[in-house]
Amino acid sequence: MRADGEEIRERRLALAKWVAREVLPHEHRVRQWLRRSGTMAEDADDIIQEAYCRLAMLEDVDHIDNAYAYFFSVVRNLLVRRLKRQRIVPLEIIAEVDALHDDRPSPEQMVAGRMAYARALEMIAHLPERCRRIVHLRKIDGWSQRRIAEHLGTTEKAVEKQVWLGVRALREAWSRAEQDADERVTTTERHGGRH
């Protein structure tokens, strides 16, 4: 029983870290969208809070490729549900909710995306040769597992295993890099901005 409790605690902690890292930085954009849609500040607070509660109920987040899009979708659905519950709501308002969403990335997000992409390519380059080749074909070039298997003269199962190993290695390398960056920031802050 204790092991189960510990596992649940670890899963909840991992989810909280994911929300803090992947969702929280986008909250201001979602709030701006709510404001543009005519939502009162108090209602926006309630909707955002309910969206976070929905995220907290997730068993895992492995199925979420784009945290911002997922969070926005939850908020939009909650807003539409709220509008439909109101007694008098012009149908045009509900129809306009989707039209108000501007999903174009900001210049900062575009630069951050390019930097993350370059960093991912650099990490892929450090994988063992066979794994590197397969991960690049699958994740960067978008080839199917079947096509890679035929191209390399191997089985789809072997390709799947190399992709799994490569992605796991990349996640670990990414986590280590973030941890190192956090430690450098903490050290810098501790020393008053001096190295």
Image: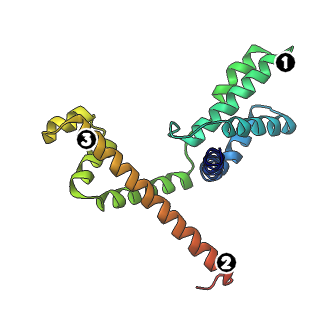
Q: Mark 1, residues whose alpha carbon is within 10 Å: few (<14), some, or many (≥20)?
A: few
Q: Amino acid at mark 1?
A: Gln
Secondary structure beneath label 2: helix
Drawn side of residue 108 relative to residue 131, left or right? right
Q: Residue at x 48, y 52 (%)?
A: 113
Q: Quadrant for residue 148, please give it.
A: top left
Place of residue 85 in the rendered image (x, y in percent of width and height, measured from the top left): 81, 17
Task: Identify residue for label 1.
Answer: 86
Between 16 and 97, the residue placed more toward the observer is 16
Between 13 and 51, the residue placed more toward the observer is 13
Task: Identify residue for label 3.
Answer: 159
Task: Identify residue for label 2.
Answer: 189
Drawn side of residue 116 relative to residue 194, left or right? left
Q: Residue at x 40, y 51 (%)?
A: 168
Q: Mark 3, residues whose alpha carbon is within 10 Å: few (<14), some, or many (≥20)?
A: many
Number of on-image labels = 3
Q: Amino acid at mark 3?
A: Val
Q: Amino acid at mark 2?
A: Glu
